[in-house]
Image (cartoon, rainbow, N blue to C red):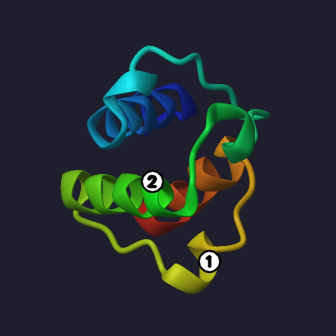
Amino acid sequence: MTDAEILSLIGEALADAAPEKAGIELSLESTLAQVGISSITALEIAGFIEDRLNIKLPDDELAPLSTIGGLVGLIRRQLQ
């Protein structure tokens, strides 16, 4: 899966968790705060991605993430 595909999936998950944020442009450099992703929304996004990709995003690795790029990297690692 490419970074662009993962970004698209994150965007889909964000729109599902917070419909008012649908269509927000995401980049690897975007911080979760800039995009308006709260800790609760981050958990909802993680659950969406886990279900869609049949992977587990460990809470101890998810919690310290502060950027979309960090989330993309975690997803990539779990896909390997």
Number of callouts: 2
Q: Position of residue 32 (x, y in %)?
A: 67, 45
User: Which residue lies at the image location 45% right of the left edge and 53% below the top edge?
Assistant: 41
The residue beneath circle 1 is 61
User: Which residue lies at the image location 30% right of the left edge and 62% below the top edge?
Assistant: 47
Placement of 28 over or under 43, stated as above or below: above
The residue beneath circle 2 is 41
Give the quadrant of residue 68: top right
In depth, the one of 5 and 50 nearer the eye is: 50
Give the quadrant of residue 50: bottom left
Residue 45's label in the rendered image is: none
Give the number of the mark in front: 1 or 2. Answer: 2
Question: In the visual, does 48 lie left or right of 73?
Answer: left
Q: Position of residue 6 (x, y in %)?
A: 46, 37
In depth, the one of 18 and 25 nearer the eye is: 18
User: Which residue lies at the image location 39% right of the left edge and 24% below the top edge?
Assistant: 20
User: Which residue lies at the image location 32% right of the left edge and 28% below the top edge?
Assistant: 19
The amino acid at mark 2 is Thr
The amino acid at mark 1 is Glu
Q: Position of residue 22 (x, y in %)?
A: 39, 20
Q: Earlier in the sequence, mark 1 or mark 2?
A: 2
SS class, disc 1: helix
What is the distance, in whole Å, between disc 1 and disc 2 at their CAs? 16 Å
Placement of 24 over or under 57, stated as above or below: above
